Image (cartoon, helix red, strand yellow):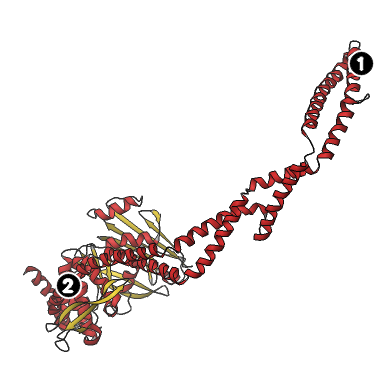
C-alpha cells in the first residue's frame, strides 16, 4: 500500500510530506483548496503525462516521490526483478519535472522510463476520477470495464491483434486480385530481364579484370618494344649498364686494398649489381610472356562491348549490373508470391478462422461476466436508493470488429419504464453518478491493487445515499487502502482517518497545506462541511452524531 508521499513545488504546494495509514481515509476541504492536487501529484509519480504547468510559479522544477510497502506484492517484486531494478520490501517512485516541461523518472533510485512507472503503477494504485460517470456513456469505456472486471483484458488484446492480422491478409488478397493483370506484365518483363542478365553471367570483379587485360593486349607491341629496349640498355649492348657497373665495381674493389675508405662504395655497387641482375631476369621473363594475340584482343573487346551495351540498356554503370540482377530476382519472387492467389486466399481464411475462434472464447467469457456483473451492480444500486433500477450488460452482436463479435452496452430498466434501455437514454445526472459509483465499487472489489483512490466520485449524491456511499467505501477500506476526496460530510464521517486541505497566503504566494485531523478536528471539519463558515453547536452536534454513527456501525 501507499505509505508516504512527498511533494515539492507542485502547482500551489511548496513542500508536503505525508504518511498514509491503511483503511479508509477522507480528504476534505473548501472548494479550490487543492484537494485533487494530491491525487494529481500521485498520478504524476505513477506515470501520468507531465507538462511545465505543474511547476510552481517561480521554481525551476517540481518533484514528487511516492513510497509503497510491497512486502506482500509478489507480482511487483517479480516485475522489478525482470526489469533489473532493486526489489526490497519498499518501492520508491520519483518523478521530477522541470520548468521547460522535461521530466525524469526513477524507480528505487535508478533511472526509469515513464512507461515503466505506468506499468508498475497498475499493480499498486487504481484511481477513479470525478468524471467517471461521464465516460461511462462511451461504448469503449463500458467494454473496458466489463473486460477488466472479468479478467479478459489480455484475451481482448489478443483478439484485437488477430483481427488486424486478418484484415491485413484480406487486404493483401484484395490487392493481389485487383492488380493481377498489371503484375503479370511486370512479372513477364522482369523474367526476360533476369534471363538476359543471367545469360550475360557478369560479375563486378570481372569488369576490372577485363579492363586490365584489354589495356595489356591493346598495347602489346609497345610493351614488347619497351622491354627489349630496357634489356639492351641494361645488359645486351656492348656498353650496357651491367658491364660498366661490373667494371667499376671490380676497379674499386682492387683499389680498396690501398684505401679502405673505398670499401663502402664497392659494397654498395655489389648490391646494385645484384638488384640489376634481378631486374634483367624479370625483364627477360616478361619478354617471353608478352605476345601479340589479336584473337584474344578481339574476344575481350566483344565481351566489353556486351557488358557496356547491357549497362546502357538498363541505364546503370557496368559494375552495377550484378546488383540489378539480384534486385530483379527478389522482385520477381515477391511478384510470384503475390500472384499465388490460392495461397493468399488460404492465408486470409486461416487468419479469419483464428480471429473468430478466439473471439468466440472472448464472447463466452463476456457472457458469463455480464450476467454476474448485472446482478452485482443491481444489488449495489439498491443500496444507493435505486431500488427500482435493474442493471444489465447487453452483448450486441457485430460481424467481426477489432474488439470482438459483440459490442458492450450498459442498460438500465426500472428507472423510466420496465424495458431495459441504454444508460444515456434513461438515467438522470444524479442517477448516472450513483450507477457509476456502484460499478466502481464492484470493479474495485474484484481488483487486485492494494490502494484505491476515489476523487469526488460522489458528485451529485447527497442525503442518506451519501451515508450509504461512505459505508460502502468503509467496507472496501476493511479489505485494502482507500482514499477518497469528498465534499460530503456523510462520506467523510465514515472514514477511519481524515485530512483537511486548506489554502492560505504566505510570503505573497497562495499555497496549499494538508493537516491530519484528530477527533476534535474532525468534528470541526465535518461541522464546517454541514453548515458552512458559521459553525454552531447544532452543526457540531450533528457532526458528532455522524461520527458516532460510524463507530456504532463498526461496533454493530
Q: What percent of the width, then of the height, locates residue 195? A: 57, 55
Q: Secondary structure at mark 1?
A: helix
Disc 2: CA contacts within 10 A as few (<14), some (14-19) or many (>=20): many
Q: In this rendered view, identify the residue nearer to me: 517 or 317.
A: 317
User: Which numbered dot is residue 91?
Assistant: none
Displayed quadrant of residue 123: bottom left
Displayed quadrant of residue 353: bottom left
Q: In this rendered view, identify the residue nearer to me: 389 or 23.
A: 389
Report how far apart the C-alphas of labels 1 and 2 lie in the structure.
Answer: 120 Å
**At 69% from the left edge and 56% from the top edge, which residue is drawn?**
309
Asked if residue 227 is positioned above or below residue 176 in the image, the reply reads above
* Image quarter of the N terminus: bottom left
Where does label 1 land, which residue?
251
Q: What percent of the width, then of the height, locates residue 434? A: 20, 80
Q: In screen coordinates, is 505 left or right of 186?
A: left
Q: What percent of the width, then of the height, locates residue 447? A: 21, 65
Look at the image and tell me whether residue 366 can be seen: yes
**At 30% from the left edge and 80% from the top edge, which residue is drawn?**
31
**At 42% from the left edge and 67% from the top edge, which residue is drawn?**
172
Seen from this angle, which residue lies furthest front? 295
User: Which numbered dot is residue 373?
Assistant: 2
Mark toward the start of the polypeptide (1 vs 2)? 1
Asked if residue 426 is positioned above or below residue 161 in the image, the reply reads below
Q: In screen coordinates, is 463 left or right of 11?
A: left
Q: Secondary structure at mark 2?
A: helix
Asked if residue 346 is positioned above or below residue 400 in the image, the reply reads above
* Image quarter of the C terminus: bottom left
Disc 1: CA contacts within 10 A as few (<14), some (14-19) or many (>=20): few
Q: What percent of the width, then of the height, locates residue 188? A: 54, 63
Amino acid at each position: 500500500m501507499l505509505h508516504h508521499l512527498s511533494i515539492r513545488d507542485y502547482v500551489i504546494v511548496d513542500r508536503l510530506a505525508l504518511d498514509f495509514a491503511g483503511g479508509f481515509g477522507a480528504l476534505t476541504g473548501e472548494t479550490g483548496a487543492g484537494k485533487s492536487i494530491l491525487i494529481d501529484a500521485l498520478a504524476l509519480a505513477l506515470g501520468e503525462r507531465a507538462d511545465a504547468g505543474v511547476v510552481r510559479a517561480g521554481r525551476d522544477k517540481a518533484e514528487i516521490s511516492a513510497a509503497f510497502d510491497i512486502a506482500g506484492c509478489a507480482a511487483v517484486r517479480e516485475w522489478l526483478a525482470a526489469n533489473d531494478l532493486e526489489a526490497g520490501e519498499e518501492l520508491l517512485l520519483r518523478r521530477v519535472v522541470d520548468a521547460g516541461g522535461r521530466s525524469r523518472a526513477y524507480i528505487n533510485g535508478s533511472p526509469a522510463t515513464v512507461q515503466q512507472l505506468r506499468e508498475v503503477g497498475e499493480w499498486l494504485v487504481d484511481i477513479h476520477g470525478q468524471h467517471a460517470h461521464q465516460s461511462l456513456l462511451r461504448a469503449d469505456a463500458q467494454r473496458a470495464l466489463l473486460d477488466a472486471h472479468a479478467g479478459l483484458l489480455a484475451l481482448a488484446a489478443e483478439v484485437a491483434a488477430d483481427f488486424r492480422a486478418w484484415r491485413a491478409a484480406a487486404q493483401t488478397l484484395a490487392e493481389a486480385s485487383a492488380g493481377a493483370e498489371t503484375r503479370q506484365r511486370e512479372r513477364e518483363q522482369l523474367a526476360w530481364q533476369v534471363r538476359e542478365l543471367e545469360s550475360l553471367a557478369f560479375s563486378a570483379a570481372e569488369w576490372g579484370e577485363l579492363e586490365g587485360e584489354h589495356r595489356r593486349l591493346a598495347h602489346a607491341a609497345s610493351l614488347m618494344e619497351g622491354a627489349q629496349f630496357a634489356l639492351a640498355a641494361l645488359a645486351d649492348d656492348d656498353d650496357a649498364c651491367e658491364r660498366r657497373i661490373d667494371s667499376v665495381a671490380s676497379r674499386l674493389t682492387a683499389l680498396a686494398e690501398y684505401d679502405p675508405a673505398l670499401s663502402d662504395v664497392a659494397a654498395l655497387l655489389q648490391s646494385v649489381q645484384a638488384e640489376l641482375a634481378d631486374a634483367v631476369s624479370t625483364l627477360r621473363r616478361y619478354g617471353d610472356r608478352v605476345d601479340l594475340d589479336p584473337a584474344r584482343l578481339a574476344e575481350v573487346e566483344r565481351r566489353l562491348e556486351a557488358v557496356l551495351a547491357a549497362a546502357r540498356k538498363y541505364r546503370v554503370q557496368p559494375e552495377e549490373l550484378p546488383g540489378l540482377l539480384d534486385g530483379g530476382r527478389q522482385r520477381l519472387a515477391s511478384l510470384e508470391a503475390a500472384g499465388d492467389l490460392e495461397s493468399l486466399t488460404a492465408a486470409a481464411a486461416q487468419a479469419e478462422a483464428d480471429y473468430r475462434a478466439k473471439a468466440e472464447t472472448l464472447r463466452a467469457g463476456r457472457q458469463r461476466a455480464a450476467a454476474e456483473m448485472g446482478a452485482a451492480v443491481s444489488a449495489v444500486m439498491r443500496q444507493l436508493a435505486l431500488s427500482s433500477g435493474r442493471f444489465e450488460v447487453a452483448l450486441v452482436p457485430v460481424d467481426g470488429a477489432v474488439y470482438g463479435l459483440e459490442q458492450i452496452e450498459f442498460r438500465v430498466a426500472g428507472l423510466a419504464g420496465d424495458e431495459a434501455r441504454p444508460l444515456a437514454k434513461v438515467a438522470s445526472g444524479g442517477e448516472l453518478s450513483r450507477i457509476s459509483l456502484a460499478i466502481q465499487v464492484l470493479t474495485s472489489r474484484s481488483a487486485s491493487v492494494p490502494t484505491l483512490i476515489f476523487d469526488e466520485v460522489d458528485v451529485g449524491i447527497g442525503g442518506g445515499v451519501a451515508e450509504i456511499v461512505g459505508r460502502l467505501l468503509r467496507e472496501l477500506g476493511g479489505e485494502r487502502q482507500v482514499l477518497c476526496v469528498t465534499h460530503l460530510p456523510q462520506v467523510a464521517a465514515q472514514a477511519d482517518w481524515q485530512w483537511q486541505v486548506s489554502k492560505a497566503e504566505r510570503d505573497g504566494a497562495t499555497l496549499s497545506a494538508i493537516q491530519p485531523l484528530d477527533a476534535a478536528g474532525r468534528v470541526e471539519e465535518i461541522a464546517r462541511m454541514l453548515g458552512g463558515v458559521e459553525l454552531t453547536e447544532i452543526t457540531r452536534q450533528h457532526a458528532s452524531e455522524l461520527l458516532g454513527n460510524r463507530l456504532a456501525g463498526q461496533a454493530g
